[in-house]
Amino acid sequence: MFAFQPDRLRQARQLALLTKTEVAKLSGVTPTAVGQYESGVSVPRPDTLAKLAMALDVDEEFFAAGRPLLRLEVGDTYFESLRATTAKQRLHATAFAEQLWEISHALETYVRFPDVRLPETPLGSSGPERAQRAAQAVRAAWGLGVEPMGHLVSHIESNGIVAALAPRTEQTKARIDAYSTLTFGRPLMVLTPDRADDVFRHRFSAAHELGHLVLHNGELTGDVWLEKEADAFAAEFLTPSAVMAGVLPRRLNFAQLTELSERWGVSVKMLVFRSQELGLISESTARRAYIRLAQNPVQHRPIRLYEGEVPSMLKAAFDLAETGGLTQVGLAKQLGWKPRRVRQILGDDDSRPRLVVIR
């Protein structure tokens, strides 16, 4: 029998979006007992361990000690929509990020990942001006100039940031657009397709989280000013003010705004906001534009139709390691996961219903 790792029970419970009371009910023990298992005060009996594994949809070996495990606290995670999330959803998100680190850490023993290239946080007081300078510094460091940026997520990954699409569930969808952390040394970013599944919103969320990673190392999360500064970073990073001031129309022209939207990979709504922010149109004109956009919503573009906006570095790392003999089953065994969990995080999960032939 293996040595029991208490924190694995906590991680599995958070991933399953369950409370200690709910796990206790499913496994036939008391909530106090579950708490004692998680804190290491007591160890579950073999029959109880089997029930816990079934309740949490993991193999019993998942609870074995000896594998790398780093805990991520909610306070060390930048959530784009913190106020819209429940405590369960935030804990689920941090547990997912822990597993994202585990699989990337495992793959880095086989494949060398890109070096992390994030400029130092600009000096000066927080606010739009600092965010603007930070966005310009990242563009310069990444050799992007001031041109429209295609394949934003690919750029993020090629500069050493591990990214992943979080699996969507009924409990988590449309709650957390994106989140990121610097806790693990190598920056991690998790992108969640929202209910709209819109590539323009997705790109803004990715740029917003990049802003957190560049600007807010060591800052306490959850403050409104951090989110505003990350928004300002995203706006400047995607649509540099030095260029936009010269190309945005000074009168509402939706045909021109739509053309610019396609070219720069951002929504028309964002361009209206930038027009007002840069002093090109008045607040009342912007308000009329928002009303018109609400009355005539644009058709969203699913994220997965845009290859460069879907994280791919982990899958590419696995494919490279596979040429040296690594298999998904072998990686799953190394991690203590079920193989389908490996496929999920690699972005290789086949969500189609399985055909069963009845003879």
Image: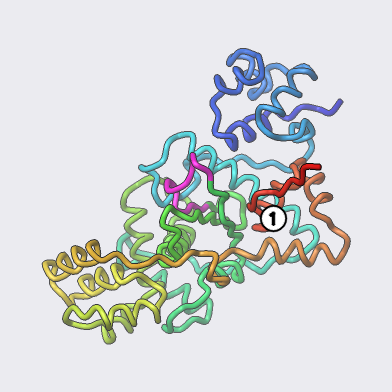
Task: Please identify the residue farthest to the left as the structure is shown.
Answer: 284
Task: Please identify the residue farthest to the front as the structure is shown.
Answer: 359
Q: Amino acid at mark 1?
A: Ser
Q: Position of residue 242 (x, y in %)?
A: 32, 82
Quarter holding the C terminus?
top right
Please tell me whether residue 3 is drawn above or below residue 98 in the rendered image.
above
Q: Residue at x 80, y 61 (%)?
A: 110
Please tell me whether residue 190 is drawn above or below residue 315 in the rendered image.
above
Query: Label 1 crowding class (10 Å Cα cut-off): few <14, some 14-19, many 20+?
Result: many
Q: Is residue 314 magenta?
A: no
Q: Residue at x 72, y 47 (%)?
A: 340
Quarter holding the N terminus?
top right
Residue annotated with mark 1: 104
Q: Is residue 129 left or right of residue 343?
A: left
Highlighted range, magenta:
169-180
Task: Please identify the residue farthest to the bottom as the structure is shown.
Answer: 246
Q: Position of residue 291 (x, y in %)?
A: 18, 63
Q: Position of residue 334 (x, y in %)?
A: 81, 46
In-front residue for pair 251/82:
251
Please tell me whether residue 302 is drawn above or below residue 169 in the rendered image.
below
Q: Residue at x 53, y 48 (%)?
A: 168
> Which of the 4 image quarters holds residue 84?
top left
What is the magenta segment's predominant secondary structure? loop
